[in-house]
Image (spheres, helix red, strand yellow):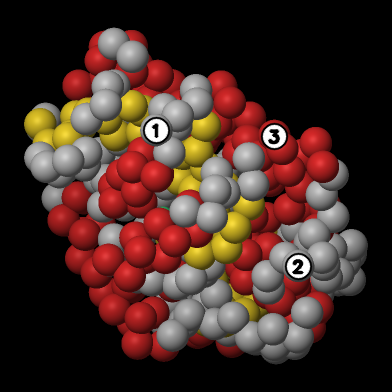
Amino acid sequence: MEEKNARKLLVDTGKELLETGLVARTWGNVSCRLDHDNIVITPSGLDYKKTKEEDIVKMSLTSGEHQGIHKPSGERRVHIAAYEVFPEVNFVIHTHQTYATALGLAGFQALDITKEEKEMLGGIMLAEYGLPGMKKLTNAVQAALKTGAKVVLMIHHGALICGSSQEETMNKAILLEKICKRNIKGNLEEKNKNSAQEAEQLMKAVKEKYRYASLVQTPSALACANSGKPIYAQVDDMAQMIGRKIPITSGKTKEVIKVLEKVNSVLVPGIGVVVTSETEDDMAALELLVEKAAVCNLHTTAFHVKARVNIIHTALMKFVYQKKYSKQKV
Ligand SMILES: [Zn+2]
């Protein structure tokens, strides 16, 4: 594909992924093959809403050299692996999509998927864990791709989706989420037990202290809040932005506010998950992460699987993420 068109396609795809909710913030990345040796890829850590054609990075598959004003995505190696394994693949999307990520945590031997859907995806395979950007992750993804699967679920992380064109790859990402959603187990029908008035009073008090605060009341978030147990980090992006766990509180306003001094999200029985942040952008990302954490938690609990991210990895990722983000804000 011509470079100019490919750059525009990546910018548009980034926005499309945001709109469909398949990625949030700067998570996930997209690439497109130009010729046998070159690809273009979204840059590292740039918001999709702000990404322009000139921000897209061109890089060589063989030498790894790149040109442009930004560094290529830190997850470029899994994209490179896809182009190397499949000569017919011209477009690759990596997402942190909710249901595919949750499904990857408990395995999928008994997946409810039709023959047609499987064919449309081009095969699906699980990849072992590796820290983002590290060789271990690349090797794991490469091994999964080499089985012939065009869709790889990266455990504790997200999905890698390969296709011959942007349209095909995007359709696969959407189809994958639909299939995974259907296969998610756990109580997703929980209703709000407390009155709206109680929630309102609590949020009023929280908002007096925090500029950006919000209440996540999705059925999954409510089910987790009502379970009386914390949500532990099972995926990398929650580890990075929230930390080791979302604690549970009794629901007393004073206690909720006190716990929020140390963490940005807390579970409140009967009410949901209270989230605070420093910016509006963070808020939107956190709401998505909380919902995903809740879905993951319910799904793994239903399968009696403990899929927590290693505690040292969690601390390391949170540290690196915050350092990276504080640099970008300056
Ligand atoms: Zn990722």
> Helix or strand or loop: what does disc 3 sit on?
helix
Question: Mark number for residue 109?
Answer: 2
Assess disc 3: are there few (<14), some (14-19) or many (≥20) residues with their C-alpha within 10 Å of its C-alpha: some
Relative placement, left or right, of 274 versus 166 is right
Q: Nearer the viewer, residue 171 or 269?
A: 171
Q: Residue at x 10, y 31 (%)?
A: 67
Question: Mark number for residue 87?
Answer: 1
> Helix or strand or loop: what does disc 1 sit on?
loop
N-terminal of the pair, mark 2 or mark 1, is: 1
Q: Nearer the viewer, residue 64 or 218?
A: 64
Residue 199 visible (yes or no): no
Whether the residues at callouts 3 and 2 have beta carbons within 8 Å, the answer is no
Give the image quarter of residue 125.
Answer: bottom right
Q: Is residue 187 above or below residue 80?
A: below
Relative placement, left or right, of 188 versus 143 is right
Mark 2 or 1, closer to the camera? 1
Mark-to-mark CA distance, 3 and 1:
18 Å
Residue 309 visible (yes or no): yes
Q: Position of residue 62 (x, y in %)?
A: 17, 41
Question: Mark number for residue 281?
Answer: none
Whether the residues at callouts 2 and 1 have beta carbons within 8 Å, the answer is no
Mark 3 or 1, closer to the camera? 1
N-terminal of the pair, mark 3 or mark 2, is: 2
Q: Quadrant of ligand 1?
A: bottom left
Q: Residue at x 39, y 44 (%)?
A: 85
Relative placement, left or right, of 64 versus 133 is left
Assess disc 1: are there few (<14), some (14-19) or many (≥20) residues with their C-alpha within 10 Å of its C-alpha: few
To which residue does mark 3 refer?
120
Query: What's the residue type where badge 2 is placed?
Result: Gln
Q: Position of residue 317 (x, y in %)?
A: 32, 72
Q: Position of residue 150 (x, y in %)?
A: 55, 44
N-terminal of the pair, mark 3 or mark 1, is: 1
